[in-house]
Amino acid sequence: MFSRFTKQERKVLVFIFISLFVGILISRYFKTHYFSKEPSLTEEDIPHININSADFSQLMAIPGIGPSLAEAILEYRKRNGAFKNIEQLLKIKGIGPHKLKKISQFIVIE
């Protein structure tokens, strides 16, 4: 296959193949060592917000809680007093079992 190329053309082809091979190796190295590692969150890394004392902006900091849910939580707390357990959040329109599971890791009741 290489016999129809001149010596100079063969050198260029070998250089291209070696460059591609080295490029692939470098790419795999960076991909496995720098980009594919998921940060592992510990219990200390997750912010815990006290649902009974949180203001509007603190409630908004909880992933999955937007302005309407934050307002609904504040309104529920105003009408019914402090939350006694996290399951009481299910009484708020817009919070179902799936949403509760998602936000519960960020909430404490004190």
Image (cartoon, rainbow, N blue to C red):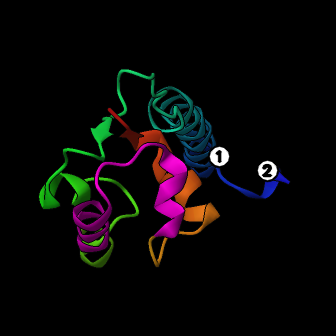
Residue 76 shown in magenta: yes
Q: Which residue is mark 1?
A: 10
Amino acid at dot 1: Arg
Q: Position of residue 5 (x, y in %)?
A: 70, 55
Number of dots carrying numbers: 2
Question: Residue at coordinates 32% horizontally, 32% vertically from top-left?
Answer: 110
Task: Answer whether labels 2 and 1 touch (C-beta < 8 Å).
Answer: yes
Q: Position of residue 73 (x, y in %)?
A: 31, 65
Q: Earlier in the sequence, mark 2 or mark 1?
A: 2
Tell me which corner region of the image, top left, top right, bottom left or bottom right, holds residue 49. top left
Amino acid at dot 2: Phe
Which quadrant of the rendered structure holds the N terminus? bottom right
Q: Position of residue 69 (x, y in %)?
A: 33, 72
Callout 2 crowding tier (Cα within 10 Å): few <14, some 14–19, many ≥20: few
User: Which element is circle 1 on?
Assistant: helix
| Of 50 and 99, the residue lying toward us | 50
Q: Which residue is mark 2?
A: 2
Q: Give the magenta range.
A: 71-91
Tell me which corner region of the image, top left, top right, bottom left or bottom right, holds residue 21. top right
What is the number of the mark on residue 54? none
In 3D space, how far apart are the residues under numbered discs 2 and 1 (Cα atoms)? Answer: 7 Å
| Of 102 and 37, the residue lying toward us | 102
Residue 38 higher or lower than 68, as above or below: above
Callout 1 crowding tier (Cα within 10 Å): few <14, some 14–19, many ≥20: some
User: Which element is circle 2 on?
Assistant: helix
| Of 61 and 28, the residue lying toward us | 61
Residue 92 higher or lower than 101, as above or below: below
